Amino acid sequence: MTDAALTRTDAPVRTRPRRVWTGALIGAALAVLAGASLFIGVSDVTPASLLAGDTDAAFLLVASRVPRTVAVVLAGASLAIAGLIMQMMVRNKFVEPSTTGVTEFATLGMLVAMVLWPGMTVVGKMGVATVFGLVGTWVFLRVIRAVPVRQLVLVPLVGIMLGGIVGAVTAFFAYRLDLLQSLGQWSQGSFASVMQGRYEFLWFAAAMAVVAWVAADRFSVIGLGEEFATNLGLNYRRVMAIGTCVIAVITASVLVTAGIIPFLGLVVPNIVSLLVGDNVRRSIPWVAGLGAVFVLACDIIARTVRFPYEIPLSVVVGVIGAGLFLWLLLRKGSRAH
Amino acid sequence: MIALDHVTKRYGTTAALDDVSLTLGDVGVTALLGPNGAGKSTLFSVVGRLIQADAGTVTIDGRDVAETPSSDLARTLAVLRQDNHIAARLTVHDLVEFGRFPHSKGRLTVEDREHIERALDYLDLGPLRDRFLDELSGGQRQRAFVAMILAQDTRYVLLDEPLNNLDLRHMTEIMRLIRRLADELGKTVIVVLHDINFAARYADRIVALRDGRVVADHDVSGFMRPEVLADIYDSPVEVHQIDGKPVALYYE
Ligand SMILES: Nc1ncnc2c1ncn2[C@@H]1O[C@H](COP(=O)(O)OP(=O)(O)OP(=O)(O)O)[C@@H](O)[C@H]1O
Ligand SMILES: [Mg+2]
């Protein structure tokens, strides 16, 4: 090795000021929005009232506002990570649980649990939804094996079709069993009913996010494709299985707590990919942070637009997410030609 | 040594490899030649456990590829495939870093970093290290892949048409690098080439495949004979001595 090469090893990695600033911005936004989320609501909880020793305010904060804020942050961060992991596994930027049938499968699982075991605990329901989510992920991965990797648009189309079919089956049975309304009610994304004792399943999602974080390099290597992964000695199947579990558990636990939050897993990793690339070890904190910020912001909007009423979070996320997605798509297109 | 023992691989009715028995890795650089569809890439895929042979066994240093843990093999053998398509947005440095995965499992040591720097250096990629792969030219990307394989630091290095997309200067540089890998670092390189003259200039041994069978296996002087070459490619090839080295002319 030459001297020049040695000195270069010791030289600091080239700093990227734009990246540092964006990172700081996401961190600050997370702190500010989380703070705001604690103090927005019908009843008055303000920092002043807390300092004055208002016990009602303190109770409300602990029983409802803190859980809601924690739930939003966990759901946002972990769903975005589920999207990222799925994109690495499929090697396609346009997939996430809700565009691949996974969410629909998990919803079907919820319906099955509701019908067969009406008295089941929420943990039990989540378990059933997770199993269905696993099956859904597996079915999707199986089906797209027939689609060439380079068919970028075909893969999510197949996923959306799959979701459509499963969604239709769910709706049919829900209709026949007169459960359409309750199905609609809880699958409509919202954190309004989150309070102490009703959000803790999201820690399962958080645990899976940690698993993804620990295995970050493996998912990067998986993203290079099966041949590269094999050449590098990675157990391809095992990593795919871990990824499948990560996706299913995150999807199911967010679903039972807050319903469907569309587009998140698609938009956030794509934005991060533009900023810092797809090395999962580097991008995963960004994805988690931006995912949390995104859902926090949308949740605050959902709580304030028609104050004192709330509009469904999925509506806000859907509108903003679809807009961002369109922008990303057009941008990508302009870069490719 | 890489030993193939009666290896057969079929796709439908065509045999991509037809009962091949071959020992590779006795000399520093072996060139693998043969017309399109001869089975060269298939041979690499079987040796690199990327596909399963229908019959026969492959052993590397006496260990059966099918029974050796993949993570062990990754520290013994590195394969660069012919077509590499990476959808992920990775920088050159990221890619080369993944070459260290079999050793580091993601936690880079000082030694890993040295290997990465050396690979970047060897392939002339210093100025491009922070560029994303999708912002590179085809040849620059090809060099990045070779750097990744180099960082993997394995005893056996299999390169499938590494000269793809390269300009004249970088073709010679890659071939010289291959020579250095063998001569200075003691590695065993097996490289698929289409240019007979590159093979003759840089390889120690040349193996030719055709229709899934080994049809020629010689040292350079034995290989560079008109009758041998014409047989392989089914077209006339002249061999001239230029500066005491055999050069094949096949442009007519
Ligand atoms: N996945 C596949 N499915 C069907 N046939 C295949 C497949 N891969 C290779 N073949 C066939 O196997 C034979 C050998 O292919 P291989 O890719 O090994 O050739 P090669 O010597 O590398 O050729 P080239 O110089 O064009 O790269 C060819 O006839 C090819 O058509
Ligand atoms: Mg080939």
Image: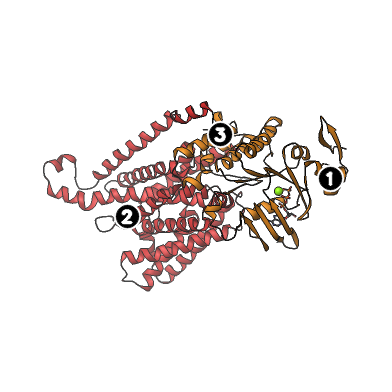
**Quadrant containing the C terminus of chain A in the rendered view:** top right
For the residues labelled 1 and 3, the Cα–Cα distance comes to 37 Å
Identify which residue, A209 or A57, lies in the foreground: A209
Q: Secondary structure at mark 3?
A: helix
Mark 3 CB lies closer than 8 A to ligand 2:
no
Q: Which residue is mark 1?
A: B229
Characterize the local packing of mark 1: few (<14), some (14-19) or many (20 or more) Cα atoms within 10 angstroms.
Answer: many
Q: Nearer the viewer, mark 2 or mark 3?
A: 3
For the point 35% across and 55% down, the residue is A258
Report x, y in % for residue B25: 67, 48
Identify which residue, A310 or B28, lies in the foreground: B28
Q: Which residue is mark 2?
A: A203
Q: Which chain is orange?
A: B
Report x, y in % for residue A95: 50, 51
Report x, y in % for residue B215: 80, 52
Disc number at residue B120? Answer: 3
Kind of residue at disc 2: Trp
For residue A6, above or below residue A59: above
Q: Secondary structure at mark 1?
A: helix
Report x, y in % for residue A294: 38, 43
Identify which residue, B201 or A184, lies in the foreground: B201
Kind of residue at disc 3: Leu
Which quadrant would residue A11 be assigned to in this image? top left
Kind of residue at disc 1: Leu
Which quadrant would residue B141 be assigned to in this image? top right
Which subunit holds the residue at mark 2?
Answer: A
